Image (cartoon, coloured by chain):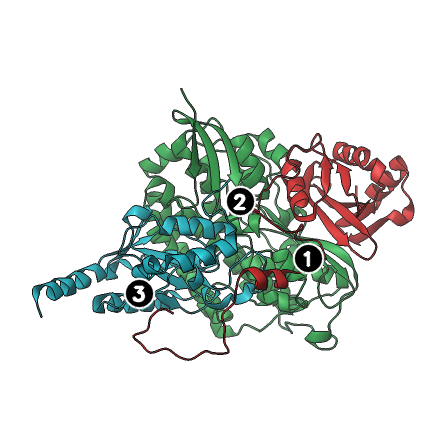
Chain colours: A cyan, B green, C red
Amino acid sequence: MNTKELIEKIKNIVRGHSLYMLHYCTGCGAIELPPTMTSRFDMERLGIAPMATPRQADILLITGYLSKKTLRRVIYTYEQMQSPKWVVGFGSCTINGGIYYDSYSTINRLDLYLPVDLYIAGCMPRPEAIINGFKKLISMIEKGDAKGWEHYIENKKWYKKNQKKALGNSLYTTR
Amino acid sequence: MKEVKLFHGPNHPGMHGNFSVHLTVDGDTVKKAKPNPGMLHRGFEKLMERRLWLNNIALIPRVCVPEPDLNEAVYSMAVEKIQNLEIPERAKYIRVLMMELARISVHMMSIGGIGGPTGVYTAPNWALADRDLILDIFEKITGHRVYHMYIVPGGVRQDIDEKTFRFIENTIRDIEKRLKDYKEIIFESPIIHKRLKGTAPLTKEQALNWGVTGPGLRSTGEKYDVRKQFPYFVYDKLDFDIPVADKSDAFTRLYLKYLEVKQSIKIIKQVINKIPKGKVRLKLTGTALKWKIKKGEAYGKVESSRGEFGYYVVSDGGRSPYRVQVRGASYPQGLYGIEAGLPETRLEDVAIWLDTMGVCAPEIDR
Amino acid sequence: MNQNEIIKKIENEFNIDKKDIKKIDSKQFKAFIKNSQIIDFLTYLKNIGFWQLSLITAVDWVDDNKFEIVYNLVSWELEQNILVKTDISRKNPKITSVINIWPAAKYYEWDVNEYFGIDFIGNPNNGKELFLENWDGPPPMRKDFDPLKYSKNKFPEKDYKNFKMKKQSEVIE
């Protein structure tokens, strides 16, 4: 292979081994994140650490359901992150609505509004399942399979139409 | 100087949960504050009217996420008051055991949570590892680490055998040996003294006017606790003490939680020695699909780690509840307390105020 | 004082009928008051020892065409809990606010106003939004609002009829 492909392959291996996760607890699945980050099931030995601002983070972790008010702020945060970036859906509420399927205030499917790379199943997932999911994400990044951010840029009109149907015309105005 | 408007928003490393506050700041002092709840709103009270009486046990633990056992216990208490059921003695002792284990695990998470606002990251690494041993006990009794679905109207679902009681005794003994080290590393460290002593004070008149209960009221000197004044299950037969402090600031409110963990360990040891033999669940009339409750209403309440936690249940004789209202324990200090108590503090102390007063977002929004 | 003495004292000093006060438990009882006397009764209760306001809530009785508002008061010294209930009409719901007696009642009343549409005369926050944002429907906790229909209309669900398993290389739809 020529030099361009070789450099791309080395870049993918290096990206997969130092990931920063945005420290934003959006739903009730976030109660199993502190045990994963501290000393019993240590997550830092895989190279993943929490980070405070979205401008310096790589992974956005949607833990559980999303209400309408949080969806507005999550879209604003996702567009502030710099590529390459990945989105992980956590729990069964992101797949088909979960236990709140008939609520007037929570969404039913996440991948109509944001491009999702990986789902982790459970209600809620144990710390061993979270680490297993992250190992799969690292192997997907090394092979070059996870390209969610390019899908968002190419199909932007379709995503914006879905977001306006759920939130009304005011996508960025808050109180 | 000009005044600037800031969002102390939902994406903050010192904030527990999804809650935001709008601040108006002049230099470094806060002039006005307004809470902005509602990011975790799911409409629980409407969902509970559409399910049967026993189906709601699968939905209810998600109302207060750090301490899920309280929700099931309060719902069962209110239903048993309307229907006049009397549950067996062994079931009451097992319910007390589950509530005290939940109280120890939530206080450990609070002691560890001081690491986010101040930067002392030794505290979470120690406290959350000890809390995990208690989640192992829950897994042996019920099968799930966090959401148990174990306490139902009429008793509890399964019995506990002798091998599990020996496991509980050994784990509690291990945790008690390690509690001495917490005092040296966390409560006598000079960083915690400099950041927490004197910040976020609370006077007795403020606490009585707002309606604050729990450790916030006990740290100003009033000795009020739901377990002594309105006793429920078998708390009037057990022997325990209630710690009180003189002056309320952030350091004494955190230290009271450490003292309450020691009292909970004393209660658990008495329960394991005194528990009688017998059945654990009443037989209901008919099947679960056709179980109906009489007409009436009742209000059940327990003592959580932040104050008085209650449910108001109304029944009209049908197969589902007619109306349920949740009274979260941090409702007074999370909504009115921020508007009246946060002005005249410094900007870097806002996170410590919200952490030690005990503002828990899911039970305000439900 | 035990519970029977407290009930007798309230009946005598306020002239309430015997059938309007009932016991629920050994530490809980409920009382039913007319709409015009509610502010005097609550001030009287605060003076004899029920100084903490725990909860203000509302129940929607659609068949009888009325709303019922419930106040929950606690006294830690006497160790009793009282539920005070009153009725208002469903077509034009209005009631006086208790914000002069307990200042922390501002947020309990704002909560009931947002979910049921009841007007509290004297509260400065009538009609503003606290928990919901840009809401475009009727007040959600009334009994004639169907949440399942609203949810299927606005948030589309996952389609399982034409579902087949994907190959490993197709990651997103």
* Residue type at the position of mark 1: Phe
Quadrant including the N terminus of chain A: bottom left
What's the residue type where badge 3 is placed?
Phe
Q: Nearer the viewer, mark 1 or mark 2?
A: 1
**Residue B340 numbered tag:** none
User: Where, by quadrant of the figure, is residue B197 drawn?
Assistant: top left
Label 1 Cα neighbours within 10 Å, binned few <14 / some 14-19 / many ≥20: some
Q: Which residue is mark 1?
A: C145
Do the CB atoms of the residues marked 3 and 2 lie less than 8 Å apart? Answer: no
Q: Position of residue B153 (x, y in %)?
A: 67, 66
Cα distance in 3D space between marks 3 and 2? 32 Å
Q: Are marks 1 and 3 on the same chain?
A: no
Three-letter residue code for mark 2: Pro
At x 73%, y 68%, the residue is: B319
Closer to the eye: label 1 or 3: 1
Q: Are marks 1 and 3 in contact (CB under 8 Å)?
A: no
Q: Which residue is mark 3?
A: A134
**Could you say which is closer to the camera, residue B320 or residue A114?**
A114
**Residue B234: image location, x then y, percent:** 64, 58
Whole-angstrom CA distance, mark 1 to mark 2, is 23 Å
Q: Residue at x 48, y 45 (%)?
A: B19
